[in-house]
Structure formats: C-alpha cells, structure tokens
Image (tube, grey):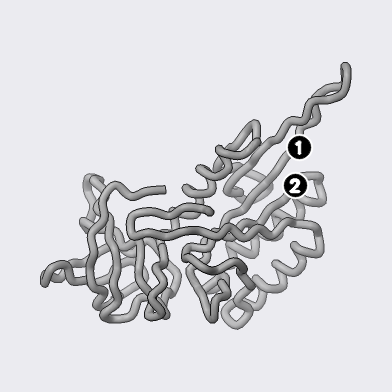
Amino acid sequence: MKYENITKATFLKRPNRFIAEVEIDGVREIVHVKNTGRCMELLIPGSEVWLTAPDSPNRKTRYDLVAVRKSNGVLFNIDSQAPNKVVKEWLLKRDYTRVIPEYTYGDSRIDFYMEKAETGFDSAPDVVDKYLMEVKGCTLEFDGIGYFPDAPTERGVKHIRELIKAKKEGYNAILAFVIQMDGVMEVRANIDTHPEFGVAMDEAKNAGVEILFLSCHVEPDSLEII
C-alpha cells in the first residue's frame, strides 16, 4: 500500500485524539491523526512524523498524520485504515477464490470473508472452505514485542467472540494482527490496558481460532506485508 504524496514534519502536541499540531518548514499546522489510540510512546514532542494530503473536498485539515519515528529509530505506520488495505492486497495474491471485505456475520461486521474451492474427485462436487478474518493493527511495541490494544476496545472483544462462534459453526476463523513496524514478529494481548481482551484471545486460541502475525516493512510513504 502506497500513499500518493508524503510530507515530513515535526510533532508538537496532540490536543485530542483526532488532531495534532505539527511544524512543517517552520510553519505550524493542525493535522488529522488517523489513529484514535493513545500512541503515547510514539507521539512525543520533537518526533519526526510524516503526513499525507488527500485531495478530499470539505476537509477541516489539509493533512493526515500517518507515520512516526519512535525514539529507538524505528518507523511506525499509525494509519488505522492501512491494515485492512494491506491485508486485502495480500489476500488477493493468495489462492482464495472469493474475498469479500466488510462481511456481516451475527451482530458484527467482520473484516473479511474468504472462500477456497477444492476440486472433488471424479463426479464429487467441489468442496468450498469458508473463512472469516478479523484484522487488528498493532502500533504498540516494547522490547521487540508487539502488544494490542493500546486502549480498551470492547469492539475488539466482541469481534473475537464472533470468531469463536464462527469456528464452532464450521468456519476457518482467523484473528490477524498487522504489525505496523519493522522487526517485530509477535503480538501479545496488552492485559495491563484491557484484561478482557487477553481473556478473549486465550479463549479464541483454545477454540481453534488461528492467530496470525503479519510482519510488515514500513516506509514513510508505504506499508507492505512481508
């Protein structure tokens, strides 16, 4: 996934979860933050950040803040819309016969529904394996390990419960973490921030839900699953 344009800036402050104040070539600018999580260990005054400028009418801000360099030198993509975009690109390159984003299942909208057809023997009908995948973007890292979530997410817990239900009903259920930084291979539940998410994740593992860690390469203008 690539951004059409990118601008480097210096982070100054974040008055609320939706906006930030940055400096571009000596000029202060209010920008939209494309992540409602806390990002407290990333968005520190003086940090290098990167912005994109979507050509969208009626915007209150010109720029979206999409990437930041952490104090350890690692570049993070913090665009909360990016994980689903890169996963869609990734799924379309694999051997699924159908990929449907935003699939309604139960009381939730699951990120992806997929099918994979296997040809039957002789006159037997094809066998269609059905998959449901929920995608979470990981932007929190400590000592080389990713953690999720960085803020309580009742919605995230609800989606895990739906995946457990789907697994019991015969679906191949997948909880996929898109790791929005280089060098991290694993994501653990951030039980200090949201203990219930950790409980739900353990229940999912025990129920046979696949936990998938998707490592990425990050550039200021791109995010790619590797």
Between 166 and 202, the one lying in front of the other is 202
Please indicate whether residue 75 sits to the left or right of residue 92 in the image: left
Q: Which residue is mark 2?
A: 172
Please indicate whether residue 62 sits to the left or right of residue 188 in the image: left
Mark 1–mark 2 Cα distance, whole angstroms, equals 8 Å
Q: Position of residue 198 (x, y in %)?
A: 68, 73
Between 75 and 41, the one lying in front of the other is 75
Q: Amino acid at mark 1?
A: Asp
Q: Amino acid at mark 2?
A: Asn
Badge 2 density bin: few <14, some 14–19, many ≥20, Cα 10 Å:
many
Q: Secondary structure at mark 1?
A: strand
Are dots 1 and 2 in contact, CB under 8 Å? yes
Please indicate whether residue 163 sits to the left or right of residue 208 in the image: left
Badge 1 density bin: few <14, some 14–19, many ≥20, Cα 10 Å:
some
Residue lying at 22% horizontally and 45% vertically, measured from the top left? 57
User: Which corner quadrant of the image does residue 11 belong to?
Assistant: bottom left
**Vertically, is 155 above or below 142?**
above
Please indicate whether residue 142 sits to the left or right of residue 75 in the image: right
Q: Earlier in the sequence, mark 1 or mark 2?
A: 1
User: Which corner quadrant of the image does residue 14 belong to?
Assistant: bottom left
Q: Secondary structure at mark 2?
A: strand
**Vertically, is 147 above or below 106?**
below
Residue 78, disc: none
Residue 129, disc: 1
Q: Residue furthest left?
A: 26
Q: Position of residue 36 (x, y in %)?
A: 42, 66
Q: Position of residue 49 (x, y in %)?
A: 29, 68
